């Protein structure tokens, strides 16, 4: 039950930071995707099911607030959370290489799927333009922020794990 409450609080805090504070800190009109970092971290630390669940809730939250089609972001985030959950077995808590690499790859997958569903299907075919203007700055900014945010999420996850072990 504590983990559930902690995850809901993490989702709400990341959503609020992403939609308020980081809108002011936008570089090249791009903000870091904190909910994507949270989804990757959930999949990496807790496995496929947790990654899928956190991704669904994060995506649905974005769909309700900003999406034109209900479920598009939920589908993208669920896919990213589930795929990152496969790395749960090779997860090393102290190593930042795998999480940072997975955040970068996940941000690229997010950009590509977003491009396909939002631009390609309406006939905007210049993917190189969108990648240089939106995709690449988004990847760089999200990876840079993920270094700090992932450490915070790792500390929270470790403390929740420790509390769950003490209760048993």
Image (cartoon, helix red, strand yellow):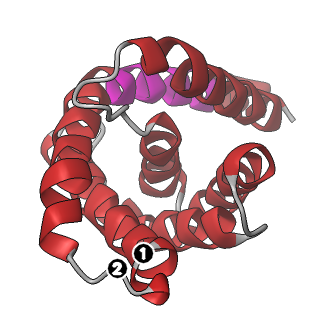
Q: Residue furthest right?
A: 1
Q: Do tag 2 and tag 1 residues touch (Cβ < 8 Å)?
A: yes
Give the number of the disc on residue 147. none
State whether residue 79 appears in this view.
yes
Image point (70%, 61%), residue name: 56
Is 101 displayed left or right of 108 in the figure? left
Q: Residue furthest front?
A: 123
Image point (62%, 63%), residue name: 73
The image shows residue 134 at horizontal and vertical percentages of 26, 50
Residue neighbourhood size for the residue with mark 2, other residues' Cα within 10 Å, grouped as few (<14), some (14–19), many (≥20): few
Q: Is residue 93 magenta?
A: no
Q: Nearer the viewer, residue 67 or 123?
A: 123
Is 1 displayed left or right of 123 in the figure? right
The image shows residue 95 at horizontal and vertical percentages of 17, 38
Image point (31%, 56%), residue name: 107
Image vertical order of residue 6 relative to residue 96, above or below: above
The image shows residue 15 at horizontal and vertical percentages of 63, 30
Residue neighbourhood size for the residue with mark 1, other residues' Cα within 10 Å, grouped as few (<14), some (14–19), many (≥20): some
The image shows residue 51 at horizontal and vertical percentages of 57, 59
Image vertical order of residue 163 relative to residue 49, above or below: above
In the image, the segment drawn in magenta is: 149-161
The majority secondary structure of the magenta stretch comes to helix
Is 40 displayed left or right of 147 in the figure? right
Q: Quadrant of the C terminus?
A: top right
Image vertical order of residue 2 relative to residue 50, above or below: above
Q: Is residue 150 magenta?
A: yes
Image point (75%, 46%), residue name: 61
Q: Nearer the viewer, residue 145 or 25?
A: 25
Tell me which corner region of the image, top left, top right, bottom left or bottom right, holds residue 150. top left
Q: Which residue is mark 1?
A: 119
Q: Quadrant of the N terminus?
A: top right
Q: Which residue is mark 2?
A: 124
């Amino acid at each position: 039950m504590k983990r559930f409450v902690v995850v809901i609080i993490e989702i709400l805090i990341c959503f609020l930071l992403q939609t308020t504070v980081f809108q002011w800190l936008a570089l090249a009109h791009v903000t870091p995707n904190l909910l994507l970092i949270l989804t990757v971290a959930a999949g990496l630390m807790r496995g496929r099911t947790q990654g899928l669940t956190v991704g669904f809730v994060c995506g649905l939250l974005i769909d309700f607030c900003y999406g034109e089609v209900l479920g598009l972001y939920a589908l993208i985030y669920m896919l990213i959370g589930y795929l990152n959950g496969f790395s749960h077995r090779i997860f090393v808590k102290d190593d930042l290489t795998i999480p940072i690499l997975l955040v970068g790859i996940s941000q690229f997958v997010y950009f590509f799927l977003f491009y396909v569903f939002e631009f390609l299907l309406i006939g905007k075919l210049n993917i190189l333009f969108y990648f240089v203007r939106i995709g690449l700055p988004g990847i760089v900014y999200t990876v840079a922020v993920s270094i700090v945010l992932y450490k915070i999420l790792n500390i929270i996850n470790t403390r929740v794990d420790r509390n769950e072990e003490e209760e048993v």
